[in-house]
Amino acid sequence: MRSDDRYDIDSMSPATSDMYIRWVCEERLCLDEEEYDRLLYLIRTLNDIEFTYTILMDENRAMDGLEMRKDFSYETNRYLDKSSGLLPNCTVFEMMVALAYKCENTIMYSYKEDFCPKKWFFIMLDNLGISDCTNDNWNGETSDYIYNKIHAMLFRKYNKNGFGGLFVIKNRNIDMRDQEIWKQLTAFLNENYI
């Protein structure tokens, strides 16, 4: 386990948000170059939206997202500051990637060659209804469409079963709008994978 006192900011180089996003896509999501190029506009849009939450326990998802910034600095010897272009708080992109990574790394972990956090990220994009927002079909209305979908997710204006949120389930006894994101994930996994 590393501690923050191992960082010597004077020995590090500054980083930009583009460098950080590419690192997150490669090192945490395991996107290949083609996937990265196809989703870049969507990723940048998600990274421009602050992750806010209405259920207190979702603060853990924000902390996981911000932890990636420390991991980036530690692994690349580059630091992120106000000039990097990142929002000061966790973004929707960071939260989703950290959740996908944690899901794969702690719950669904298999052998290293099968390590695939992007699977969970793509499931979330599908459930949100934004997986078709690729660079190929991007237009002037795409950003507004994504913002509306993310706003509905953040303020839990989606269906009881989770449709329009991050995870969809069949269990009619659970209202996904009342569940913290981690419990939504585990309910989804229990129905579909475990």
Image: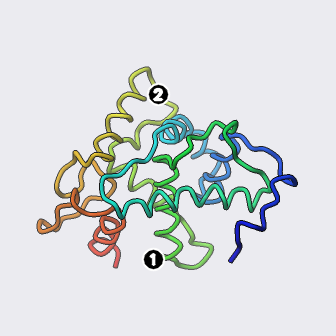
At which x and y percent is residue 2?
A: 71, 73
Q: What is the crowding at mark 1: few (fewer than 14 residues within 10 Å), some, or many (at least 20)?
A: few
- Residue shown at 42% from the left, 60% from the top: 59
Q: Nearer the viewer, residue 131 or 59?
A: 59
At which x and y percent is residue 133?
A: 43, 36
Describe residue 98's horizontal placement relative to residue 69 as left or right.
Answer: left
Above/below status of 118 relative to 79: below
Which of the 4 image quarters holds residue 192?
Answer: bottom left
* Disc marking residue 138: 2
Task: Tell me the SS state at disc 1.
Answer: helix
Identity of the amino acid at label 1?
A: Ile
- Residue shown at 18% from the left, 65% from the top: 170
Q: Nearer the viewer, residue 151 or 109?
A: 151
Q: Nearer the viewer, residue 107 or 15?
A: 15
Residue that carries the numbered disc 1 in the rendered image: 107
* Mark found first going from the N terminus, 2 or 1: 1
Above/below status of 140 relative to 145: above
Task: Tell me the SS state at disc 2.
Answer: loop
Q: CA distance from mark 2 to mark 1?
A: 34 Å
* Disc marking residue 122: none
Above/below status of 22 relative to 190: above
Q: Nearer the viewer, residue 30 or 20?
A: 20
Identity of the amino acid at label 2?
A: Trp
Instruction: Single out the residue that lies furthest toward the right.
Output: 11
